[in-house]
Amino acid sequence: MNIKQFIFNTFMVNCYLLENGTGEAILIDPACYEDKEKAELTGFVESNHLKVIRNINTHCHIDHILGNEFIDDTYGVRPEYHHDSKPFFVTSREIGLSFGYHLKRIPEPQGFLNDGDLIPFGDSTLKVLFTPGHAAGSICLYDEKNGIVFTGDVLFKDTIGRTDLPSGNFDHLMTSIRTKLFNLPDETVVLPGHGPHTTIGYEKMNNPFIR
């Protein structure tokens, strides 16, 4: 599996495009908003002759969902996320406007993802890990074969997701990290929703919030 990382919008969200060698692609948190960001994404897809087949939101805070409408309009692929994330869309337009983002349409979900769901992709499989605490409905995606976990805003290098936003809960976040992420192999590479990558082992030893 090949992974292309983009950094989109003023919140500098890490968007990941996964390509499995067959021409199919999965997007994780396609947060593109500006025209140049959309062109960067579509240019990569077109130049590599890819077909986008799924759009997965690790959680539904405004900075991570800004590209959902564009992905639906461009590729006919609606977002997938955990059902507990759905309430975020009630106020998404107002939240977006408060940061200068204008959302015209909120696509209906293609479907909901639950803890333990398996997403086959080429010769790899992404496993859904339900990891609330930063936001209701937060999920991580674990690829055991390639030793990678996409953590959204749950775990970052040397820090954790903030818990002072609506539906955030520090105790729930700690439980999610300790029971769903820290039981993965230490060498597992962590690809977060913002910032640089890290590993599970490094965070166990060095993350000051989880010692």
Image (cartoon, rainbow, N blue to C red):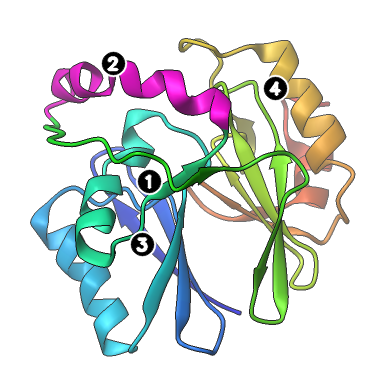
Q: Is residue 123 above or below residue 152?
A: below
- Residue under label 1: 13
Q: Is residue 20 above or below residue 33?
A: below
Measure the C-alpha gap from mark 2 to mark 3.
26 Å
Q: Is residue 34 above or below residue 59?
A: below
Between discs 2 and 3, the one toward the N terminus: 3
| Residue at (29, 51) in percent of width and height | 8
Residue type at tag 2: Thr
Q: Tell me the SS state at disc 4.
A: helix
- Residue under label 3: 6
| Residue at (64, 80) in percent of width and height | 122
Between discs 4 and 2, the one toward the N terminus: 2
Q: Tell me the SS state at disc 1.
A: strand
Q: Image quarter for residue 50?
A: bottom left
User: How many residues crowd mark 4 within 10 Å: few (<14), some (14–19), many (20+)?
Assistant: many
Q: Is residue 98 magenta?
A: yes
Measure the C-alpha gap from mark 1 to mark 3.
8 Å
Measure the C-alpha gap from mark 4 to mark 2.
23 Å
Between discs 1 and 4, the one toward the N terminus: 1
Residue type at tag 4: Leu
Quadrant holding the N terminus? bottom right
Residue type at tag 1: Val
Q: Tell me the SS state at disc 2.
A: loop
Disc on res. 173:
4
Q: Image quarter for residue 105?
A: top left
Whole-percent x and y of residue 51?
A: 38, 78
